[in-house]
Image (tube, rainbow, N blue to C red):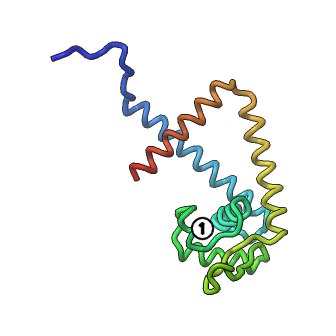
Amino acid sequence: MTAPDPAAPRAASDDEIASVDEQLRLLFVRVRAVWKEAAAAVHPELQPVGYKILSAIVRRGPMHAGAIAAELEIDKSVVSRQIRHLQALGLAVGVTDPKDGRARIIQPTPQAIDSVGQKSSRLQRQLYRQLRTWSAEDVDQLARLLGRLTSEVLLAG
């Protein structure tokens, strides 16, 4: 039997992992609060899930409802209801897909593009302002570790 390599990294303890879990929980609570705030800033009747859908089509461009559901990992029935709500609020329109006349593509209205763009800019400015107080190494390490966690969780899920 060989002795453990003293230079090998030590595996994280359950307490250390629980600390990460708690910080992620707190981050998700804050993200949900930001989505709620951002949704209300765009339209007082807009729900956070509607904001997520709207911001996706603003950032990524027009999409089919099924692609939105897959991209955001939201049930298709929820996406359909939210799209109808976005259309009723004047924030999105459905247009015929030029490649398939039976399908509809959901696109944001100019009002939605302006509203989401302004709100995203304020939130992005806050993030950038805070991260500029960190060292370049810390920001790089955060990005690397978040990317690693995201890819490993997605692959395991």
Residue 23 falls in image quadrant: top right
Q: Position of residue 118 (x, y in %)?
A: 83, 55
Q: Nearer the viewer, residue 77 or 1?
A: 1
Q: Position of residue 13 (x, y in %)?
A: 37, 29
- Tell me: residue 72, above or below residue 129: below
Helix, strand or loop status at disc 1: helix
Q: What type is the residue that disc 1 sits on?
A: Ile
Mark 1 Cα within 10 Å, few/some/many (few <14, many 20+)?
A: many
- Tell me: residue 137, above or below residue 92: above
Quarter containing the N terminus: top left
Left or right, residue 8 beside residue 105: left
Left or right, residue 2 beside residue 148: left
Q: Residue at position x 63%, y 27% from top?
A: 138
Q: Residue at position x 74%, y 28% from top?
A: 133
- Tell me: residue 37, above or below residue 8: below
Left or right, residue 18 beside residue 144: left
The residue sitting at the left extreme is: 1
Residue 128 falls in image quadrant: top right
The residue sitting at the bottom extreme is: 102
Residue 7 falls in image quadrant: top left
Q: Nearer the viewer, residue 40 or 82?
A: 82
Q: Position of residue 34 (x, y in %)?
A: 69, 53
Q: Residue at position x 53%, y 35% from top?
A: 145
Q: Pointer 1: what residue? A: 68
Q: How many marks?
A: 1
Left or right, residue 153 beside residue 119: left
The residue sitting at the front extreme is: 99
Q: Position of residue 24 (x, y in %)?
A: 53, 43
Q: Nearer the viewer, residue 75 or 64?
A: 64
